[in-house]
Image (spheres, rainbow, N blue to C red):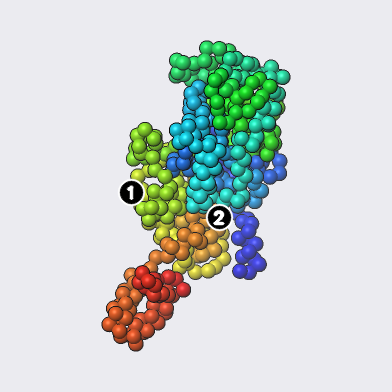
Amino acid sequence: MSFLDFFFTLKPSNLPPLEFKNTLSGNLEVFEPINGAVKMYNCGPTVYDRQHIGNMRPYVFADLIRRTLAVWGFKVKQVINITDVGHLVSDADEGEDKMEKSAKAAGRKAQDIAKEITELFFQDLDELGIERTKIEFPRATQYIDQQIALVKGLEEKGYAYKISDGMYFDTAKFPQYGKLGHIDLKGLEAGARVEENMEKRNPHDFALWKFSKTGEKRQQEWKSPWGKGFPGWHIECTAMIFEILGKQIDIHTGGVDHIPVHHNNEIAQAEALTHKQYAKYWMHNEHITIEGKKISKSLGNTVYLQQLTDKGFSPRSLRYWFLTSHYRTPANFTWEAIEGANTALRRLMTHYHEAPAGRVDQDFMQKFYTAIANDLDTPKALALVWENIKMLNKQTLAQADKVLGLLDSKQQKEMTVIPDEVQALANEREEARTAKNFARSDELRQAIEDKGFMVKDTSEGPKLSKK
Ligand SMILES: [Zn+2]
C-alpha cells in the first residue's frame, strides 16, 4: 500500500455531515460532540438468562454508531453496563428481582449465573463482529457505593422520599418528567397496573433503593443509610455514567421499550442532581419479531445466536440481516430471511476475495457515506454495495466494511466458496487416487493449484482451500 492509499484509507476526505434522529427532539440533528471524545452509553443486559437474537439488535446498533463515528474521525469512549442485581420483573418497581429469581430456581449463586451469562454474552458479541475490546463493561454490583451516593444527593436536594418498601424519586419535583419521546403521562397512568403502590406520592415515582423484605434473606443485599436492600434499576445506569463518562454524555442508546420509563427516569434523577442536560443525543432501536410474533419465553419462540451457527449459518449473517433494516424499523426474523442473509454474506466474501487491489473508489465512498450519514441508512448502503459490486476493488470493499463490520477474517476462511470447476477437479483427482493412478492425480493437483486452490488429504477426505 502506498502512502497515499494509506492516507485515504485512514482519513476519508469526502465525509458529509453526520445526522442522527434524536429521540429527545424528534428531529434529525447534525452530530456534534459536546467536547472532545464522544462519550456513548448503551443500556446493557440483565445477566440472569441468555440473550436472544432480539436482545442483540441494540448492541449491533451501538457498534454501528461507534464504527461510524470512528470513520468520521471521532474518538469514542463506549460503555455497556452489565446488570447483575436488582432489575425487577416489571418497570413498576414491583415483582421479583430477575437475578434472585433465576438463582433461586436453579439453586445457584446469583453471581455464578451472572458470570456465566456475561461470558455467553461476550461470545455472542465477538461472533457478531462487535469490537468488544474497545468497550468498557462495568457491573452494577461494583458501583453500589456510587448508587447510594446518588440517592443521598437526591434526598438532600429534596427529590427523594422514603416509604415502607424503599426510597422513591418524587416526579412532581421534576416538571419536565416524561420529556423523552413526549410521553403521555396520563396515558401511561391509565395503562398502569391496578396493584400500584398506594404509598407513592405520584403514579410515576420510581424506586431509587428497595428494602429487603423482613424475614427474607436475599443473596445480594447491601447496607444503606435508609435500610438494608438493593438499588433500583434506573439508578445504576446514572451512577456508572457519572463515574466512568462524566455528568454529561453525547449519546445514550437502548431499545424503544426503554423510552417511556427507564430512560425518562434516568433523565429525571440525573438532571435533578446536575441541572445540566444528561445526554445530548438519545437514539433507540426498534424491536424484532420472530415469524411475526413478539419474542417471548412463554410463546417458546426464542432464538439464540448459537442456534444459527448450529444450523450452519455464519453468526455474521445475523449482523447482515440486522443491517438490511433501518434501526428505527421493526424487523421480522424468519429462517428464510436468515438463509438469504447468509447467502448474500457468502457472495460478499467471495467478491471481496476475488476483487482486484486498487485505490479506494472515492466516488463510490461518497455515495456510501451519504447513506450512512443519513441516520445510519444501512439498507441503502448495502444496496449501493450490491449495485456496484462488479466495479468495487478490495480496498473499497474494506473501507465500506469499516462501517458495516461484515468481513471477518476468521469466518472468511471457513466461508471461502469453492468454484464448481475446482470441486470437479478435486472429485476427479480423488477417483484417480482411488484407482491408484498417481500420475493423473498429480496432474489434477497441479490443475487445482493453477486455479488458485490447494487440496489437502485429511482423515476425513480431501479438503480444498484458497492458496
Ligand atoms: Zn439503562
Residue 209: where, in percent of width, then height? 61, 23
Q: Which mark is residue 409?
A: none
Which element type, helix, strand or loop, lies under badge 2? helix
Name which residue lies at 69% across and 36% down.
243
Q: Is residue 41 above or below residue 451?
A: above
Counting other residues with Cα less than 10 Å from the Cα at mark 1, is it few (<14), some (14-19), or many (20 or more)?
A: few
The reply to whether dot 1 and dot 2 touch (C-beta < 8 Å) is: no
Residue 15: where, in percent of width, then height? 60, 51
Front label number (1 vs 2): 1
In the rendered image, which quarter is residue 22 located in?
A: top right
**Image-based side of 267 in relation to 308, left or right:** right
Name which residue lies at 32% across and 81% down.
433
Q: Residue furthest bottom?
A: 439
Name which residue lies at 53% across and 60% down.
398
Counting other residues with Cα less than 10 Å from the Cα at mark 2, is it few (<14), some (14-19), or many (20 or more)?
A: some
Q: Is residue 230 above or below residue 336?
A: above
The N terminus: image quadrant: bottom right
**Image-based side of 136 in relation to 430, left or right:** right
Residue 70: where, in percent of width, then height? 61, 50
Out of 231 and 131, give the one closest to the viewer: 231
Which residue is labeled 2 in the image?
402
Is residue 348 at all visible to an observer of this figure?
yes
Q: Is residue 394 above or below residue 54?
A: below
Which label's residue is closer to the chain start, 1 or 2?
Answer: 1
In the rendered image, which quarter is residue 295 located in?
A: top left
Residue 12: where, in percent of width, then height? 61, 56
Q: How many marks?
A: 2
Out of 335 and 6, give the one closest to the viewer: 335
Q: What's the residue type where badge 2 is placed?
A: Lys
Which residue is labeled 1 in the image?
336
Is residue 29 at all visible to an observer of this figure?
no
Out of 157 and 185, give the one closest to the viewer: 157
